């Protein structure tokens, strides 16, 4: 893709970055729920890693 | 000297450390009598070598465990991390002290070190800001660490006085660390034509700061793991009981921070529209760094903390430490001056590597000297419940 003005370039770059930001935020939610998924199981079994 | 003393003195590590210290002292004499050119490969194209890239940039980043741990324990009030504070503060104190020590080799004329602070402050310079913050934070760390030294010396009144400053010092530490960790990244904003576009970004200050938090958390796990092997007999029941909780909690935090760091790296890539460079050789090296040493540790930490897999977390901590060292090397050395022909590129001399190794060994020896004498991994019997 060619950019004839700096404005064109910024519009293109920012569009991609806004989409990327959305993907990253969704990824964060996924990562956090993945990390916490087993917490309730560990609490139930009484083994929480904190002796 | 009895046979037993000889056996405990002449361990493989002590022999190795002794050789490194002797070589380091010889190099020190050479550096300060014959000039910087006699022991380094530095030149006008490459004025900063591994003494900046490793000793300073990595030293400061690896010492970030001090402010992250004390903030978690004292600012966020997570008391189960209290036992990790002293080892982290000691590591940070020695790390910063050695950064300043190593800086003398690069700058020369040690008696002039105070000039930028007291005589000729260049208040518009980022280097001045870094210097001032390191000077102030090293002072803060010295006071924070002094509580353990005062307990060891039995100076109860002075210890009580210093201990009362804990919260203020922690706040100071967080503010100063935020400033200079990011400023170290900002130093490279001055060289857009020298640093490869994949590493150069307006987000460099944020990247340096966020990655320092990740490696600070990892260093606490990494250093704790090594200390467990070497100084297990110096640890009290409280430290041992809290250790697994510290590892799991810090692994969880490090996973999220590394994911944030990865996100910032990708946003920086997108904002400058540098995707095309990913298909080059430099792109392969960049992907090796961010996939192998940022994305992978983030995922491994997440799996480790979810499954409560302590060995996996400890290996991941080592991988993260390596990754941040690699990143600082890439920014300051590998991707710096990338357009120069290979004959003009910098590679450290044996003298530079020897001095860096000397600095690391001095740090390990100082750490060992202190933890075998002072209450770092245990509560002093006279000051139980006074923390």
Image: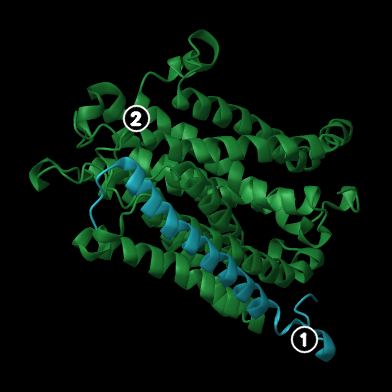
Chain colours: A cyan, B green
In this rendering, does residue B167 appear at all?
yes
Which residue is pictured at 23% across the width and 53% down the height? A2
Q: Considering depth in this image, is B45 or B210 the residue closer to the camera? A: B210
Is the residue B357 above or below the residue B83 in the image? above
* Res. B308 visible in picture: no
State the residue at coordinates (29%, 48%): B197
Mark 2, other Cα within 10 Å: few <14 / some 14–19 / many ≥20: some
Q: Please report, as a chain letter, where disc 1 is located.
A: A
- In the rendered structure, find residue B265 and report the number of the disc placed on it: none
Q: Position of residue B357 (x, y in %)?
A: 37, 48
In this view, A26 is above or below B113: below
Residue B148 in the image, given as x and y percentages of width and height: 75, 43
Q: Position of residue B330 (x, y in %)?
A: 32, 51
Q: Which residue in the protein does label 1 denote? A: A42
Host chain of mark 2: B
* Mark whose residue sits in front, 1 or 2: 1
**How many numbered marks are there?**
2
Secondary structure type for disc 1: helix
Q: Quadrant of residue B165?
A: top right
Residue at 52%, 40% in the rendered image: B182
Compared with residue B36, is residue B212 higher up or lower down, i.e. above or below?
below
Q: Going by the image, does B349 lie left or right of B221? A: left
Residue closest to the eye, B82 or A9? A9
Q: Residues within 10 Å of mark 1 (few under 14, many from 20)?
A: some
Q: Are marks 1 and 2 on the same chain?
A: no
Q: Which residue is identified by label 2?
A: B106
- Residue B22 % position (x, y): 35, 42
Distance, label 1 to label 2, CA atoms, is 52 Å
Instruction: Pick whichever, B266 or B314, lies toward us.
Output: B266
Residue at coordinates 66% horizontally, 51% vertically from top-left?
B68
Q: Is residue B74 above or below residue B266?
A: above
Say what secondary structure mark 2 lies in.
helix
């Amino acid at each position: 893709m060619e950019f004839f003005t700096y404005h064109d370039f910024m519009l293109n770059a920012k569009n991609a970055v806004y989409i990327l930001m959305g993907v990253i935020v969704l990824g964060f939610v996924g990562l956090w729920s993945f990390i916490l998924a087993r917490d309730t199981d560990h609490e139930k079994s009484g083994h929480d890693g904190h002796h | 000297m009895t046979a037993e003393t000889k056996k405990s003195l002449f361990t493989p590590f002590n022999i190795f450390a002794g050789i490194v210290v002797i070589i380091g002292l010889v190099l020190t004499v050479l550096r300060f009598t014959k000039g910087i050119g006699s022991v380094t490969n530095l030149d006008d194209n490459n004025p900063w070598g591994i003494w900046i890239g490793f000793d300073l940039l990595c030293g400061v980043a690896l010492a970030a465990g001090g402010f992250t741990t004390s903030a978690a324990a004292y600012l966020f009030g997570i008391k189960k991390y209290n036992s990790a504070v002293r080892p982290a503060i000691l590591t940070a104190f020695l790390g910063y002290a050695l950064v300043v020590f190593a800086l003398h080799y690069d700058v020369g004329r040690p008696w002039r070190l105070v000039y930028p602070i007291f005589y000729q402050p260049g208040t518009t310079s980022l280097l001045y800001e870094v210097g001032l913050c390191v000077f102030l934070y090293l002072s803060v760390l010295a006071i924070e660490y002094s509580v353990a030294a005062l307990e060891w010396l039995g100076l109860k009144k002075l210890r009580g006085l210093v201990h009362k400053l804990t919260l203020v010092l922690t706040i100071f530490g967080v503010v100063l660390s935020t400033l200079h960790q990011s400023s170290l990244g900002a130093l490279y904003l001055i060289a857009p034509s020298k640093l490869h576009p994949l590493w150069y970004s307006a987000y460099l200050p944020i990247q340096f700061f966020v990655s320092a938090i990740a490696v600070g958390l990892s260093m606490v796990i990494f250093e704790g793991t090594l200390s467990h092997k070497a100084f297990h007999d110096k640890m009290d029941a409280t430290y041992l009981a809290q250790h697994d909780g510290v590892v799991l909690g810090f692994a969880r935090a490090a996973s999220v921070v590394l994911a944030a760091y990865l996100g910032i790296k990708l946003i920086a890539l997108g904002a400058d529209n540098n995707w095309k460079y990913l298909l080059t050789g430099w792109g392969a090296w960049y992907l090796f760094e961010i996939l192998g040493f940022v994305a992978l540790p983030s995922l491994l930490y997440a799996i480790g903390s979810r499954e409560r897999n302590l060995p996996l977390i400890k290996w991941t901590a080592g991988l993260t430490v390596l990754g941040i060292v690699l990143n600082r090397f890439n920014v300051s050395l590998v991707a710096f001056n990338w357009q120069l022909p290979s004959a003009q590129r910098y590679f450290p001399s044996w003298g530079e590597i020897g001095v860096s190794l000397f600095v690391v060994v001095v740090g390990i020896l100082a750490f060992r000297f202190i933890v075998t004498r002072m209450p770092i991994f245990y509560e002093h019997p006279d000051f139980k419940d006074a923390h």
